[in-house]
Image (cartoon, rainbow, N blue to C red):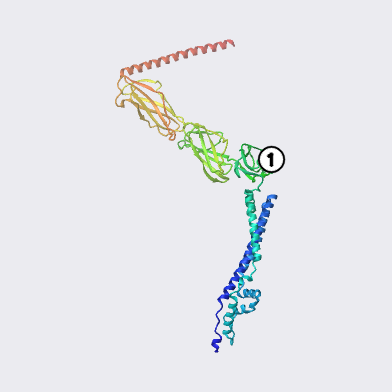
């Protein structure tokens, strides 16, 4: 035989590899099945034991968490040891072949030799491949009728699986038998914080944690299931540390109600009925929003030239047409603010901004001409709570008075004039701020009113002015016998709520002939001279009386 034939490799046995792979798969299945069965028994037992202990002792969350950690740790160890490790470190063909040879002595060392000699470079120089081929063939002949799987003992794994089924069946039966109680205990075993230990009386609250405003009433209602008593108690633990128990009477059906009036501080409460109690529930009591301070500034109308003035809330006498600016500091953060104006239909929302000392609310209120008697500030916080019993700030609206005017000349309200007359007149006007316009208004024989604008110079609060009216230039010319009624009208400079208009007393002038006018002048002159004579006579009498008094004094001395 040549050297080339000596080093020729031998084909491995597919039959032997297949049968060894079957042994390896059974080894893994037995190990994993046993591990899973043991894990099921341990999980069922530990979970049932923890639920029983919780039902008896009402275990706190920390203890339940420790039990859950122990359960998870034990399960993880078993699954790692009996399932994961055999899969990762599964035996190779040599290890499985040795296991088979130890269980089946008839193979002696044939099985492992048939495996190893078929590998590359396994036949040394000078050795015969024909002998190795013959060895593999004989080994296959011996192995073909032999069930290699029997070398793996699965009896222990089967017993564990049966035990696990029994444990699991008992657990499922118990879980379904207890119903809602088992469901609650299972939730608690997995660290539910909102589930209570089931009792004969199960207590359910209507509503959970809540936030209420200071001073409001808090109704507390609970419903009972199972064994329902006629009375229970409400246990309240206040934020200050004190604990108070209140009786709760059964109302209609299975409800229990108790109302805590005018609460002033936060608290936690529990409703206890028979052997059951509710989950501890928190009630946070927060103050309602309110006004901590208000700064008021009055912006006078521009026509007054008075600018801005700070105002006291106790003295809000405002000129109509002004703007009242308010800067409101709330007692807490708010989401909405509204100012209500009494006596009007106006409602303004306050603009919010951040100030130096916290949030500030700004609003500008135009002071109307209509009745405006006061305002109040309504606030709403982020919880939807509104301010209550808001203060009402009184406002007195001072209207801009219309200007006044009087004619100071002529003295008489009725005059006689000719068609060519030039009437000299004088007037005096007065306003709170300034006179803007002056006009001479007149009508002839009760006809339409006409007006002549008068140039009076600089606008001021007080105006004294003279005007010479040329009646002869009226068109059409006033006929003799006609009557001219005239007066002075003035307007102020109020361009916000005005202008205000004032008028003097109406004077009349009758148009007469020249002769009638001369006669009137003569009569007036006679009256004037007569008054002078009367004054002279009165003066003479006074002088005589004074002389008499002087003489009497001298004689008495």
Residue 376 horizontal side relative to residue 516, left or right:
right
Q: Tell me which corner region of the image, top left, top right, bottom left or bottom right, holds residue 125.
A: bottom right
Left or right, 219 with respect to 516, comes to right
Which of 384/183 is in front?
A: 183
Please give left or right for residue 413 compared with residue 209 in the image: left
Residue 465: image x %, image y %?
A: 41, 29
Q: Is residue 386 above or below residue 483?
A: below
Provide the residue designation for mark 1. Answer: 245
Query: Which corner quadrant holds the C terminus?
Result: top right
Q: x, y percentage for residue 56?
A: 70, 50
Q: As rendered, which of 467 and 247 lies closer to the eye?
A: 247
The residue sitting at 58% across, 78% down in the picture is 141
Q: Which residue lies at the image location 57% right of the left edge and 73% below the top edge?
A: 18
> Could you tell me how many numbered marks the image carries?
1
Q: Is residue 24 visible?
A: yes
Q: Position of residue 131 (x, y in %)?
A: 58, 84
Instruction: Write down the quadrant of residue 212 in the picture.
Output: top right
**In what quadrant of the picture does the N terminus appear?**
bottom right
* Residue 306 shows in this picture: no
Of residue 500 and residue 490, the one placed in the foreground of this image is: 500
Crowd band around label 1 with a 10 angstrom C-alpha radius: few (<14), some (14–19), many (20+):
few
Q: In the structure shown, which secondary structural element does the residue marked by tag 1 occupy? A: strand
Location of residue 402 with respect to 511 vertically, above or below: below
In this view, which residue lies farthest toward the bottom? Answer: 2
Residue 261 locus on image (x, y percent): 63, 37
């Amino acid at each position: 035989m040549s050297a080339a034939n000596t080093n020729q490799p031998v084909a491995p046995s597919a039959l032997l590899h297949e049968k060894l792979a079957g042994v390896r798969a059974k080894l893994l299945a037995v190990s994993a099945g046993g591990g899973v069965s043991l894990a099921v028994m341990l999980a069922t037992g530990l979970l049932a034991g923890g639920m029983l202990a919780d039902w008896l002792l009402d275990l706190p969350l920390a203890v339940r968490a420790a039990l859950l950690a122990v359960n998870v740790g034990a399960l993880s160890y078993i699954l790692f040891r009996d399932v994961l490790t055999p899969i990762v470190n599964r035996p190779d063909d040599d290890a499985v072949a040795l296991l088979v040879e130890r269980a089946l002595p008839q193979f002696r060392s044939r099985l492992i030799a048939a495996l190893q000699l078929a590998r590359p470079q396994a036949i040394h120089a000078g050795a015969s491949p024909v002998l190795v081929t013959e060895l593999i063939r004989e080994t296959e002949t011996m192995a073909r009728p032999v069930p290699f799987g029997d070398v793996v003992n699965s009896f222990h794994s089967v017993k564990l699986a049966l035990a696990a089924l029994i444990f699991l069946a008992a657990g499922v039966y118990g879980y379904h038998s207890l119903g809602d109680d088992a469901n609650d205990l299972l939730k608690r075993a997995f660290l539910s914080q909102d589930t209570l230990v089931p009792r004969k009386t199960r207590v359910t609250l209507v509503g959970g944690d809540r936030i209420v405003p200071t001073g409001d009433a808090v109704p507390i209602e609970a419903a009972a299931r199972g064994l329902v008593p006629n009375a229970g108690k409400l246990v309240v633990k206040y934020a200050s540390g004190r604990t108070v128990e209140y009786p709760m009477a059964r109302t209609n059906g299975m409800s229990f109600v108790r109302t805590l009036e005018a609460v002033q501080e936060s608290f936690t409460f529990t409703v206890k009925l028979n052997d059951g109690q509710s989950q501890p529930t928190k009630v946070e009591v927060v103050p309602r929003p309110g006004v901590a301070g208000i700064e008021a500034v009055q912006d006078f109308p521009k026509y007054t030239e008075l600018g801005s003035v700070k105002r006291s809330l106790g003295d809000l006498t405002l000129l109509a047409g002004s703007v009242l600016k308010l800067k409101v500091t709330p007692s807490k953060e708010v989401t909405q603010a509204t100012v209500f104006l009494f006596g009007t239909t106006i409602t303004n929302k306050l603009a919010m901004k951040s100030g130096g000392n916290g949030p500030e609310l700004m609003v500008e209120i135009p002071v109307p001409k209509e009745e405006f008697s006061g305002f109040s500030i309504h606030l709403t916080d982020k919880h939807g709570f509104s301010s209550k019993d808001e203060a009402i700030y009184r406002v007195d609206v001072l209207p801009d008075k219309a200007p006044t005017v009087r004619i100071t000349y002529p003295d008489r309200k009725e005059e006689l004039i000719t068609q060519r007359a030039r009437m000299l007149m004088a007037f005096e006007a007065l306003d709170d701020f300034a006179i803007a316009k002056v006009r001479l208004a007149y009508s002839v024989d009760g006809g339409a009113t006409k007006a002549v604008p008068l140039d009076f110079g600089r606008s001021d609060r007080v105006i004294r002015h003279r005007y010479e009216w040329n009646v002869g230039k009226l068109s059409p010319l006033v006929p003799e016998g006609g009557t001219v009624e005239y007066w002075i009208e003035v307007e102020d400079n109020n361009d916000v709520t005005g202008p205000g208009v004032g008028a003097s007393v109406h004077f009349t002038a009758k148009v007469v002939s020249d002769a009638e006018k001369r006669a009137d002048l003569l009569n007036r002159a006679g009256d004037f001279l007569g008054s002078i004579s009367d004054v002279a006579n009165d003066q003479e009498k006074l002088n005589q009386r004074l002389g008499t008094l002087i003489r009497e004094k001298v004689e008495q001395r």
